[in-house]
């Protein structure tokens, strides 16, 4: 993959990391030991639409689409009007 730096180190060495990325390296940024970002060289001239990029990322397995049959959320409160009852009790 490439080098990995904590967020603290990356902030302190940003100029150095940018030089490395300009030379073609990929840098991973971690936060509390988990990878949260990648610094990669920018690609010039690619005019990829949102739909094309989404399809490419799904093809690479980087992301997946939303499930087709998502379950509906049910309300947590059993009774409605909790705020009204609360205000009435305060009076």
Image (cartoon, rainbow, N blue to C red):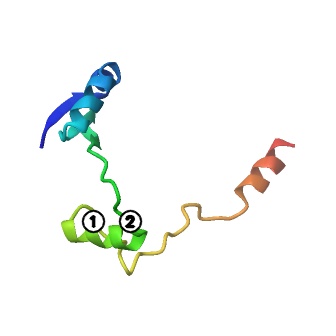
- Image quarter where the N terminus lies is top left
Instruction: Choose between 14 and 6: the one closer to the eye.
Output: 14
Measuring from the top left, give residue 24's x and y in whole percent: 19, 41
Q: Residue at x 28, y 63 (%)?
A: 63
On the image, which quarter does residue 66 sit in? Answer: bottom left
Query: Residue pushed farthest bottom?
Result: 69
Label 1 or label 2, whichever lies nearer to me, is 2
Measuring from the top left, give residue 74's x and y in whole percent: 51, 69
Give the number of the disc on residue 47.
2
Measuring from the top left, give residue 80's x and y in whole percent: 68, 64
Measuring from the top left, give residue 68's x and y in whole percent: 37, 80
Instruction: Choose between 37 and 87: the one closer to the eye.
Output: 37
On the image, which quarter does residue 85 sit in? Answer: bottom right
Give the number of the disc on residue 40.
none
Please tell me whether mark 2 sits on a helix, a strand or a loop.
loop
Residue 88 relative to residue 10: left or right: right
Query: Residue pushed farthest top?
Result: 12
Q: Is residue 90 above or below residue 31?
A: below
Query: Residue pushed farthest right?
Result: 91
Instruction: Choose between 72 and 28: the one closer to the eye.
Output: 28
What is the CA distance from the residue labelled 1 to the residue labelled 2? 15 Å
Residue 24 relative to residue 83: left or right: left
Q: Which residue is mark 1?
A: 57
Please tell me whether mark 1 sits on a helix, a strand or a loop.
helix
Residue 60 relative to residue 71: left or right: left
- Image quarter where the C terminus lies is top right
Q: Residue at x 27, y 35 (%)?
A: 29
Q: Earlier in the sequence, mark 1 or mark 2?
A: 2
Query: Residue pushed farthest left?
Result: 1
Can residue 32 be seen here? The reply is no
Q: Is residue 75 above or below residue 1?
A: below
Instruction: Choose between 52 and 35: the one closer to the eye.
Output: 52
């Amino acid at each position: 993959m490439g080098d990995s730096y904590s967020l603290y180190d990356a902030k302190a060495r940003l100029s150095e990391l940018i030089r490395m990325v300009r030379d073609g390296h990929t840098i991973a940024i971690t936060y509390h030991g988990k990878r949260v970002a990648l610094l990669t060289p920018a690609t010039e001239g690619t005019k990829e639409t949102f739909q094309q990029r989404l399809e490419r990322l799904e093809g690479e397995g980087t992301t997946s689409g939303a499930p087709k049959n998502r379950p509906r959320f049910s309300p947590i409160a059993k009774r409605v009007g909790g705020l009204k009852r609360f205000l009435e009790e305060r009076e």
